[in-house]
């Protein structure tokens, strides 16, 4: 399950960035991975939980606009408690390593 979370976060970061998406669309995952190796911050090594936190915090203007236009509710207290319970998984998911151990595409 953790592998899928890491893959989903990487896919989100690649698809929301026009240049990364162009590299992925025009070439393949291997070329994208090589290009990411040259980037200061790699979408393929991003912490999936930080990616989700940043999205829901609206830190990126595009994400914030999406949330403002498409959100119809505020998280309940039980949802906040669930998020706090996931902190142990964050450390495991945000450690060193690739998005997936097999070099599969986003």
Image (cartoon, rainbow, N blue to C red):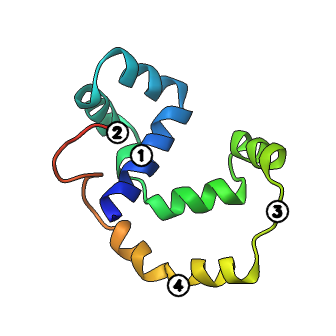
> Does residue 68 appear left or right of residue 19 in this picture?
right
Alpha-carbon distance for marks 4 and 2?
Answer: 27 Å
Q: Nearer the viewer, mark 3 or mark 2?
A: 3
**Tag 1: Cα neighbours inside 10 Å, few (<14), some, or many (≥20)?**
many
Q: Nearer the viewer, mark 4 or mark 1?
A: 4
Q: Which mark is residue 61?
A: none
**Tag 4: Cα neighbours inside 10 Å, few (<14), some, or many (≥20)?**
few
Residue behind mark 4:
85
> Does residue 7 appear left or right of residue 50 in this picture?
left
Which of the marked residues, 4 or 1, is nearer the chain's N terminus? 1
Alpha-carbon distance for marks 3 and 2?
Answer: 30 Å
Q: Is residue 42 in view?
A: no
Q: Is residue 49 in view?
A: yes
Q: Residue furthest left?
A: 102
Residue behind mark 1:
10
Residue behind mark 2:
106
| Residue 98 placement (x, y as % from top left) | 25, 53
> Does residue 84 appear left or right of residue 62 in this picture?
left
| Residue 22 placement (x, y as % from top left) | 44, 19
Alpha-carbon distance for marks 1 and 2?
Answer: 7 Å
Alpha-carbon distance for marks 4 and 1?
Answer: 23 Å
Answer above or below: position of 66 versus 72.
above
Residue behind mark 3:
73
| Residue 81 placement (x, y as % from top left) | 63, 85
């Amino acid at each position: 399950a953790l592998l899928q979370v890491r893959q989903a976060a990487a896919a989100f970061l690649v698809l929301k960035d026009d240049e990364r998406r162009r590299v992925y669309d025009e070439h393949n995952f291997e070329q994208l991975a090589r290009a990411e190796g040259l980037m200061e911050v790699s979408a393929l090594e991003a912490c999936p939980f930080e990616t989700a936190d940043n999205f829901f915090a609206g830190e990126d203007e595009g994400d914030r606009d999406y949330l403002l236009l498409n959100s119809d509710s505020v998280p309940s207290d039980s949802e906040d408690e669930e998020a706090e319970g996931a902190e142990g998984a964050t450390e495991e998911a945000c450690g060193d390593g690739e998005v997936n151990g097999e070099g599969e595409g986003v």
